[in-house]
Structures are given as structure tokens and as C-alpha cells.
């Protein structure tokens, strides 16, 4: 019975092992420029929210110093309507993977997996809707 329990837990442990490509680093460094901006939206009292968006070429490096990704973000003007009768506009970053290159720890160009794509996602607000007060 003890052997069965041991084998069961061993099987569960091995089956739960992350099958994604290990990127070989624990953290990363991002290098690039961001531009600060302010959006104003109507409410009972008008409010201004500071945010930033990424401009130019950005490079991501591993905690071991090798380059993971490099590319440029798209910038678009987004208009949000339907909040207290007053639309507001802000600049938003997005990603076109054709404008990005990705490398493994050996310096070889690779196709990005979801983990790498998530790594380069721009975070301008904690939410896409700044009215949720989670920014």
C-alpha cells in the first residue's frame, strides 16, 4: 500500500511539472523610453489620470544578462465613450510580433512562446478601464 501511495504521488508530481520551455532566468530587465501623459475625463468632478506609454525600441534582458527580446511597440489613440457623457482619449501601446525578435540563452533567434509574449506586454494601467480605480 505504501508503494502504491508513493507511486501515486510521484506520478502526480511529475505530471504537474511545467512542460513549457524553461527560459533559464528568474527575472528580467527592460530597457527603453516611456512618455508620460495625462488623460482627463468628466465625472461629477473632472479627474486627471497620469499614465505612460512606451516609445522607440525596447530590449528585454534576462537576470543572467543575455538578450531575450527586442522590438518596438505600436502606438494608437484610443477613444473611450459612455462614461458620464464625456469621451476621453489616451495613447495605447500594442504589439505586432513581426516587429519583435526573440532569443534563447544561446543567442539563437527563436519563435516566441506565450511566456515570452506575456513578458513584453505593455502595462499602462492596471486595467484597460481607468474608471475602475484599480490603476
Image (cartoon, rainbow, N blue to C red):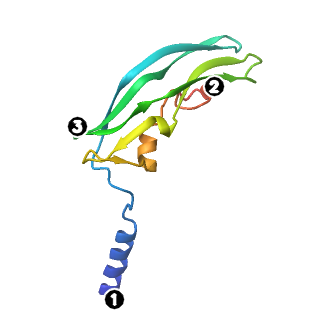
Q: Are marks 2 and 3 in contact (CB under 8 Å)?
A: no
- What is the distance, in whole Å, between disc 2 and disc 1 at their CAs? 57 Å
Name the residue: 27% across, 46% down.
Answer: 25
Look at the numbered disc 2 and give the secondary structure of its residue.
helix
Q: Are marks 2 and 1 in contact (CB under 8 Å)?
A: no
Crowd tier of the residue under label 1, counting other residues whose Cα lies within 10 Å: few below 14, some 14–19, many 20 or above: few
Residue 99, percent across and down? 46, 34
Residue 43 against residue 32 in the figure, above or below: above
Horizontally, residue 72 falls left or right of residue 61, namely right
Q: Give the mark, 2 or 1, whose residue is nearer the N terminus.
A: 1
Q: Earlier in the sequence, mark 2 or mark 3?
A: 3
The CA span between labels 3 and 1 is: 49 Å
Task: Where is residue 118? Give x, y as percent.
Answer: 45, 42
Q: Secondary structure at mark 3?
A: loop
Residue occupying image coordinates x 27% and y 50%: 24
The residue carrying pointer 3 sits among few (fewer than 14), some (14 to 19) or many (20 or more) residues within 10 Å by Cα, namely: few
Picture layout, residue 2 above or below residue 125: below
Residue 91 vs residue 9, the one in the foreground = 91
Residue 32: quadrant of the picture: top left
Q: Position of residue 87 (x, y in %)?
A: 72, 18
Between marks 2 and 3, how big is the CA–CA gap?
A: 38 Å
Residue occupied by mark 3:
65
Residue located beneath label 1 in the image: 1
- Left or right, 4 with reference to 75: left
Q: Which residue carries the number 2 mark? A: 131
- Observer-nearest residue: 65 or 135? 65
Looking at the image, which residue is at 32% across and 75% down? 10
Amino acid at each position: 500500500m505504501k508503494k502504491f501511495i508513493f507511486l501515486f504521488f510521484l506520478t502526480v508530481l511529475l505530471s504537474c511539472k511545467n512542460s513549457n520551455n524553461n527560459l533559464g532566468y528568474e527575472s528580467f530587465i527592460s530597457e527603453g523610453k516611456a512618455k508620460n501623459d495625462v488623460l482627463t475625463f468628466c465625472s461629477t468632478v473632472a479627474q486627471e489620470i497620469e499614465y505612460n506609454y512606451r516609445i522607440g525600441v525596447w530590449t528585454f534582458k534576462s537576470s543572467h544578462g543575455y538578450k531575450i527580446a527586442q522590438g518596438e511597440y505600436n502606438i494608437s489613440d484610443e477613444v473611450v465613450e459612455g462614461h458620464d457623457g464625456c469621451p476621453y482619449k489616451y495613447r495605447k501601446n500594442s504589439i505586432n510580433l513581426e516587429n519583435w525578435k526573440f532569443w534563447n540563452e544561446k543567442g539563437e533567434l527563436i519563435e516566441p512562446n506565450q511566456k515570452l509574449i506575456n513578458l513584453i506586454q505593455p502595462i499602462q494601467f492596471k486595467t484597460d478601464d481607468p474608471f475602475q480605480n484599480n490603476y
